[in-house]
Amino acid sequence: MAKKARIVIIGAGMAGLTAANKLYTSSNNTFELSVVEGGSRIGGRINTSEFSADKIEMGATWIHGIGGSPVYKIAKETGSLVSDEPWECMDSTIDKARTFAEGGFEIEPSIVEPISGLFNALMELAQGKEISQTDGDSADIHEIATRFFSARNGFDGKSVGSFLKSGFDAYWDSISNGGENGVNGYGKWSRKSLEEAIFTMFSNTQRTYTSADDLSTLDYAAESEYQMFPGEEITIAKGYLSVIHHLASVLPQGLIQLNRRVTKIEWQSNEDNRPVKLHFSDGSVVSADHVIVTVSLGVLKAGIEGGLFSPPLPGFKSDAIKSLGFGVVNKLFVEMSQRNLPSLQLVFDREDSEFRFVKIPWWMRRTATMTPIHSNSRVLLSWFAGKEALELEKLTDDEIVDGVLTTVACLTGKEVKKDTAESPLINGSLNEDDGEVMKITKVLKSKWGSDPLFRGSYSYVAVGSSGDDLDAMAEPLPKINKKSGQVNGQVNGQVNGQVNGQVNGQVNGHDEDKVHELQVMFAGEATHRTHYSTTHGAYYSGLREANRLLKHYKCDF
C-alpha cells in the first residue's frame, strides 16, 4: 500500500486547529495528521481565564463585527454566546466615561466629545470610509476633517500617525479665537494643550487596536485595505476558548501533542522520502510531507535570526517577515473593593510640560482608560501597548498597584495612602459617596511579549511594508512556477541538498514531480491581507492552507 501523506501542523491556536479540523473532516482518512504545540495548552493567543469571579480574556477578546464572522457563527451554533455567569464586556451599556486630566481636573463632555468626533472622523478617512456623522453637535468637526482630506487630495504621507497629526493641526488652524488662552476651571491647561492631550488619549487607544508602539510606524496606505465585518462587536459569554474547544472536539485523542516545541524545520531534506524534517526540543525528529507553520510573526522574526529554517527562507519570505510589524498589547486587571465604579479616561500632559506630575510612572502615561469589565464588576481593565506593555510584564504587583494609585490620585485629586496592613487605599471614592474608602485587592496582567512561544500579540502593516508582504507570508515553499515547471530561483537549485549549481533550479515539466510541492506552508493572522491581527483572519488562513492541500490531493469529498 502507498503510504499516507504526513501533515504536521505547528501550533494549536485558531489557525492550526481550523486547518486540522478541516483536513480531518474533509479528507476521508487520506492523511496522517498531527498537531504539535510547544506549550501546555491549546488556544495560542486565545486564553480564557477567571478573575474576581468574572470570566476574562487574557488574549483575544472581541468578535469584530457579527455580520459574516465565522467566529460568531461557531460561537452562536455552539451556544457559547449565553451564560449565567458574568463575563468580560458582557454589556455595552456602561455609563459614559468620566475624563480626568493631570492636575485633578474632571473634563466636561462638551470639551471631550468634539475631539473624539475629530479623531474618529480622521480614522474613518484613513481607513477609506465615508465619515459617519453621529450627532448634530459634531457637524463642524466632520466638515473640518473632510475639508482637510480634500485639500490634501487624499494624503501622501507614510504613516497613520502623521495623518492624524496633520488632521489635528488643520483642525486647530481652522478654529477662530482659539488661541493659547487657559480654559476656565482647568488650571494652567491651555485650550490647545488640553485638546491635544485628549486627542493623544484617543491615539493611545488606537495603539492598542493595532499593537503599534507608535502610530507613526503604522503604514497609511495599507490602512484602507484592512476590513471589518458589519454589526456590533461582542465578546463570547462562555469564553473565546469555547470556539477553540469546538474546533478541537472532532479530532481524535492523541492527534494534538502538547509540550512539543519545534527547534528546527529542515525542508528539502527528502528523509525517508519525505521532504521535511522537524527537530524538537527533546531531541526527537519527525519527517513529514507537508508542514503548516502557524506560529506568530514574532516567533518567525526570531526564527529567521536564530536558524529555525534550514535552508534559510528565500528572500521574498524573510523580507516580508522582517518588514511587517508585530507589536505587544497587554491587559491589566485590577480588582477593587467595591462595585459600580465609573469608567475613567486618562489625559496626561506632554513630556516637556513643566506642570506634569513626575510621580506618575512613565509606563502609565500612555494608558488611555480604566474601565469596569461590566457594569456590576469590581474589576477595572486597562490596556497597554508597545514599550509600556513590555515594562508592565517586568513589574511586581506592588509596583503596579503603586503606579495605578498614584496615577488615579494625580488625575482625580484623591489622596493616596496605605493602611497598616500595607494594603493600598484611595481615601475618597469616585462614586457618589465620597466618604467611602476604595482598596485595590489584587491585580492580574498578561505577558505576551516575554513569552517565547508568542513574542508579542498581533501583526500590523508597518511603514516600509505593504499588503503585498502579507500575501508573501501566505506563499508556500518551495515556490514553483506552474507554467514553466520551474522552481523559483529562491530555492537556489538545492533540491534534496544534493543537486549542484549546474541544474540552476530548473525542473522541466515531466520531472516536476521530483520536487515536492507544499513542503512548508504558512497560516496565522499575519498571513491574511485584509483580516490580519484578528482571530477570524487566523481562521480564514487555516482554512486556506487546508483547502490548498485538499485540492493538491484532489480530495473532493
Image (cartoon, helix red, strand yellow):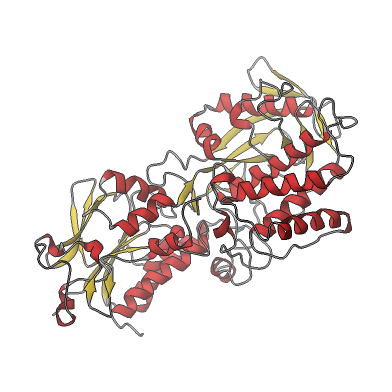
What percent of the width, then of the height, locates residue 409? Answer: 74, 25
Question: How many numbered discs, if any?
Answer: 0
Residue at left 81%, top 58%?
143
In the image, taking residue 103 as reference, residue 78 lies left or right, namely left
Q: Which residue is drawn at 74% across and 62% down?
A: 131
Q: Nearer the viewer, residue 497 or 92?
A: 497
Residue 96 is at least partly visible in this image: no
* Quadrant of the image containing the N terminus: bottom left
- The x and y percentages for residue 476 are 32, 66
Relative to 207, does residue 506 appear above or below in the rendering?
below
List x then y, in percent, for residue 132. Answer: 76, 63
Residue 535: x and y in percent read: 51, 60
Q: For this rendering, which residue is in front, 127 or 458?
A: 127
Question: Along the line of sight, which residue is nearer the eye, 67 or 360?
Answer: 360
Tell me which corner region of the image, top left, top right, bottom left or bottom right, holds residue 440: top right
Tell me the quarter of the image containing the C terminus: bottom left
Left or right, 454 with reference to 353 = left
Q: Measuring 42% from the left and 51% from the top, which residue is drawn there?
A: 323
- Is residue 1 in view? yes
- Residue sitting at the far top: 420
Q: Which image quadrant is residue 430 in? A: top right
User: Of residues 421 and 477, which is closer to you in this image?
Assistant: 477
Farthest bottom residue in view: 556
289 left or right, relative to 258 = left
